[in-house]
Structure formats: C-alpha cells, structure tokens
Image (cartoon, helix red, strand yellow):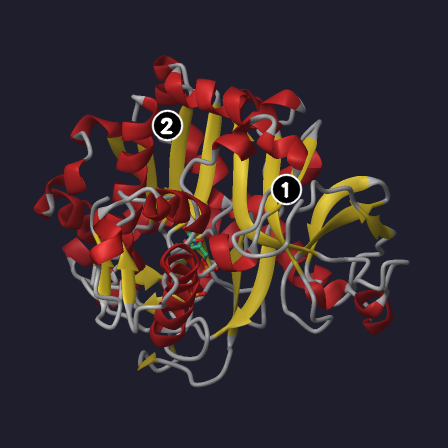
C-alpha cells in the first residue's frame, strides 16, 4: 500500500476508497493506485461548491448583447453585411495556413445510444457516410478552395480514444494528411455521492467520466496542442462539435469578422423564436458577455419582446466558436480554470456489500466544464447570427427531430430546396458530397452554371458527387 496516498485520501475524508483493498490482487492494486494518483483531491472543495451552487441560483443582471444579425432571413439566406465584407480577410487567414479546426468528440453520446464514437455514426441518407468522414471532406473542400487544408485537432475521451484513432487509420484519414490530424485526450473527473464521498465504480476503481467539452481548454495546453499550433503559425481555432452535421468547418466570413473586430472568442447563434426552446442564450450579465442557460431565465424574461415584436433574448448558442490561440495560451499559463458545473446523474457504483450496481435513478453528482465559459474571460467577443437550417443540425437523440431520422429529413429538406431553386424540381431524396458545396447558396450557384445538371432525372434520388 502506498501509505502516502492512503494518508492523503484519509485526510480528505475519502478513506473509504480503500475499503476492498485487502481483497485485491497485485495487478488490481497497481491499477487502482494509478487511478487514485490521477484524482486531484485539491479539487474536492471546488466540486462540493459546484454542487452547492445549484441550490442557490446565481444572481444575474441580464441585458441583451449585440450580435451581427442575418441580412437576409429567406432561404438561401445571407450573413450580416459586416461579416460578408470580411470574407477576403478570413480567406487570407485560411490561405496563409493560420486556421486550425478543433473537433470535440470526447462525449459519451448517451442519448444517441450508439455503440462506438459518435463520429463513426453513418449519418448521410444515401451513402451512409459517417460524421467523421463528413468533417474530413468538408476540410478537404476548404483545402481545395484556399490551397491549404487546416490541420485537424480531435479531442477524444479515454473511453473512445482507441476506437477513434483506429477508425481514422482504417480509413486512411479520409484523404487528409496523417500528420495534420492530431488526437488528444481530455481530462476525467470523479463523481461524488450524496455525502460528498467519491463514488467507487468497482472495488478497485473510482468512477471517472470526461470533464466536459470545456475540458478542451486545459487539454489543448497540457497535451501540447497549443504549442503545436503555435509552431504551425496558427492564430485562430475553429471549434466545432462532432454531432453538428451541417456546421461549416472553417467559415471565412466568421473568421474575417473575428479578426477585424479584434476578438479573442467568437460565437455563432441562431434566432430563438419559441420562448420555451431549451437553448443557452448569449447575453450580458452585469455588462459582461456570457451564455446563460435557459433554466436561468424567468418566464417573463424568456417571453420579453422588443419593439419589433421579436424575442429580446433571441441569440441561441449553437456551440460553434472561434478561439484565439494567444488567448487560450494566456488562460493556461495563468492557470485560469473554467468553472465546474455539477449535474445529478446515474453513476454506476459498488454498494456496501461489494455488489456492482447500475442505478435506474440519478444517485450521484458528475462534474463538467463548459467551453462557453471562456466567453466572459475574453477581452472582446463577436456574436454572429447564422441560418438555423443551414448550420445547426445536431445528432443528439435516438429519435425525434435530433435523432438519425429527423436529422436525415432536415438535411434533405435543406439541400432539396437548393436543387428546386436552381433546377425547378425537388428530388425525392438527396445527398450532397461535402466536397462539392459548402451550403445551399454555393450549390445553387454551381447548379445554375452546370450543363450536366440540366439533364438529371429529378424523379429519382439524387446523389451529387461532383459538378
Ligand atoms: P453533448 O453535451 O451533446 O454530450 O456534447 P454527448 O456526450 O455528445 O451526448 P450525451 O449528452 O451523453 O447524450 C456536445 C459535444 O461536446 C463533446 C461531444 O463529443 C459533442 O461533440 N463533448 C462533450 C466532449 O468532447 N467532451 C465531453 O466531456 C462532453
């Protein structure tokens, strides 16, 4: 027994983790020691505080925050004029190889219930292309357009790191340059039971789970990814999540606007029309830009309308960001942590008799950091409205609008509208290779100039693979 380790856990009132120690074999003891060494007992106070914070909601002093709103809200839409004017600046940044894409894929995908990393889900309606391949092909399209393919940084969790790496290797990195795809694992957090004790999942192992998408800030630094970016001359990180099928990987208008406004963090939002929609809202709290969870809005606030009759708090965050490399480096070097958030969840545990239990009801507290908590720390923040159906289609659930069928339906509705606008008719089913077009506007432009497209049989499913 490592006496020092035992003493540290006992001093932190966590001596129960050794309850089964005498029963364990040598290998189990070594494994458990390694795992316990990874738990930062100094964080227990922070974890307890996060749990307590839920009982006393934070006092907020909310006001709406400025955003660059769409200049055309009708399909195929147009971003704010100010953003479109900055396209050349964003394109230059891409051409100069100063942009990296950061794909966070370390979540557990519990709601989807798919056995494997979510990125391996075969999502496209005709080819069954996986999310990872969709993103790789979007990147390749950017590479063709700007002569440089941004490097791809993929954040994984301990639970899916091997499967994710294998998947990319088996598929030869989907045509990307292997040296330009970097995987790195995020941190883990333990869970606490109702008495503030660490939950043991097995007799020889405490429960730990991924530390949230906000874990990316620490992991980028600790795993040497920020240093790697600096070496490559990267200034801007395009942060996207693995479940958002429609998100552009690197949007020149967004990048140009971020740079021209001297922002350290930027975010994309969609317009919230339904006051009840469960989405975090970009706004000001005491004059500081931040994202506030829908649960923190009173009914009255959520329903408040401006002179134009539209919701006053309309900026629904879609978890798409630009992050400055220097900004993240500064946070890391100062040791600035993002806050911990507690959530009451079902956590597997060993009971007093040593039985392994998978509870049916929430029984313990899990802890995560959220990436949007960098927003109040940035000296300048840009918020850009984007068209919902064009850029926000997350695969979250096993069914419903954000389940596989709902996502495929919305995806096809969007692209079929583009074909209809260009060629006068909607195909019954459609898929567009991400190598071909960035969005409907882009596709329409190519279709109206294409001789070949004029002879397509639009009564049949349409798979657009080249133009
Ligand atoms: P979600 O919050 O939707 O979680 O993640 P999830 O794990 O994918 O799904 P559920 O809640 O278990 O059903 C949004 C994005 O953040 C990433 C996910 O991979 C997804 O891209 N994420 C989430 C991480 O990378 N790490 C985490 O710890 C949590």
The answer to whether residue 336 is visible is: no
Question: How far from the left and from the top, in percent, is residue 248?
Answer: 42, 44
What is the quadrant of residue 48 in the picture? bottom right
Relative to 252, say whether 317 is above or below: below
Disc 2 secondary structure class: helix
Residue 419 is situated, as x and y percent measured from the top left of the image, at: 37, 59
Residue at image point 42% right, 25% down: 99
Disc number for residue 41: none
**Residue 257 position in % (x across, y down):** 61, 29
Question: SS class of the residue under badge 1?
Answer: strand
Closer to the camera in the image, 430 or 292: 430
Is residue 14 visible in the rendered structure shown here?
yes
Q: Position of residue 12 (x, y in %)?
A: 54, 52
Q: Is mark 1 within 8 Å of ligand 1?
A: no
Q: Residues within 10 Å of mark 2 (few under 14, many from 20)?
A: some
Left or right: where 51 falls relative to 368 = right
In primary-sequence order, the first of circles 2 and 1 is: 2
Rendered image quadrant of residue 2? top left
Q: Quadrant of the C terminus?
A: top left
Provide the residue designation for mark 1. 384
Closer-to-camera residue (222/318)? 318
The 10 Å Cα crowd at callout 1, few under 14, some 14 to 19, many 20 or more, is many
For the point 76% across and 49% down, the residue is: 283
Taking 309 as reference, is 41 above or below it? above
Residue at (35%, 16%) from the top-left corner? 232
Mark 2 and ligand 1: say if the CB distance to the nearest ligand atom is below 8 Å.
no
Q: Which residue is mark 2?
A: 225
The total of numbered circles placed on residues is 2
- Can you tell me which quadrant of the image ligand 1 is in? bottom left
């Amino acid at each position: 027994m490592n006496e020092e380790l035992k003493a540290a856990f006992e001093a932190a009132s966590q001596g129960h983790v050794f309850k089964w120690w005498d029963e364990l074999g040598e290998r189990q003891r070594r494994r458990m020691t390694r795992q316990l060494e990874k738990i930062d007992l100094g964080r227990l106070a922070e974890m307890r505080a996060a749990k307590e914070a839920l009982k006393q909601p934070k006092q907020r002093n909310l006001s709406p925050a400025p955003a660059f709103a769409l200049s055309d809200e009708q399909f195929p839409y147009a971003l704010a004029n100010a953003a479109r004017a900055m396209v050349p600046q964003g394109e230059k940044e891409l051409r100069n190889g100063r942009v990296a894409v950061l794909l966070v894929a370390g979540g557990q995908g519990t709601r989807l219930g798919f056995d494997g990393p979510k990125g391996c889900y075969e999502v496209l309606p005709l080819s069954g292309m996986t999310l990872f391949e969709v993103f790789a092909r979007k990147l390749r399209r950017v590479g063709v357009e700007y002569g440089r393919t941004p490097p791809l940084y993929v954040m994984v969790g301990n639970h899916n790191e091997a499967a994710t790496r294998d998947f990319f290797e088996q598929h030869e990195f989907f045509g990307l340059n292997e040296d330009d795809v970097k995987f790195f694992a995020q941190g883990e957090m333990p869970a606490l039971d109702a008495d503030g004790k660490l939950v043991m999942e097995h007799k020889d192992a405490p429960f730990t789970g991924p530390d949230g998408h906000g874990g990316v800030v620490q992991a980028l630094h600790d795993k040497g990814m920020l240093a790697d970016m600096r070496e490559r001359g990267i200034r801007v990180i395009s942060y996207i999540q693995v479940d958002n099928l429609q998100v552009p990987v690197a949007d020149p208008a967004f990048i140009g606007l971020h740079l021209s406004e001297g922002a350290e963090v930027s975010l994309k939002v969609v317009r919230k029309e339904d006051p009840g929609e469960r989405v975090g809202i970009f706004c000001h709290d005491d004059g500081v830009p931040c994202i506030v969870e829908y649960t923190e809005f009173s009914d009255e606030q959520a329903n408040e309308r401006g002179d134009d009759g539209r919701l006053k708090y309309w900026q629904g965050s879609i978890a798409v960001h630009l992050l400055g490399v220097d900004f993240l480096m500064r946070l890391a070097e100062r040791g600035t942590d993002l806050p911990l958030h507690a959530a009451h969840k079902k956590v597997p545990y060993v009971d007093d008799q040593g039985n392994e239990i998978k509870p049916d009801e929430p029984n313990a507290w899990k802890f995560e950091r959220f990436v949007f908590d960098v927003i109040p720390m940035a000296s300048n923040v840009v918020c850009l409205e984007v068209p919902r159906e064009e850029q926000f289609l997350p695969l979250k659930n096993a069914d419903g609008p954000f389940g596989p069928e709902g996502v495929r339906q919305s995806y096809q509705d969007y692209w079929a509208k583009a074909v209809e606008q260009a060629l006068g008719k909607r195909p019954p089913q459609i898929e567009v290779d991400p190598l071909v077009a960035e969005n409907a506007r882009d596709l329409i432009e190519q279709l109206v100039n294409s001789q070949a497209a004029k002879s397509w049989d639009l009564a049949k499913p349409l798979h657009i693979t080249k133009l």
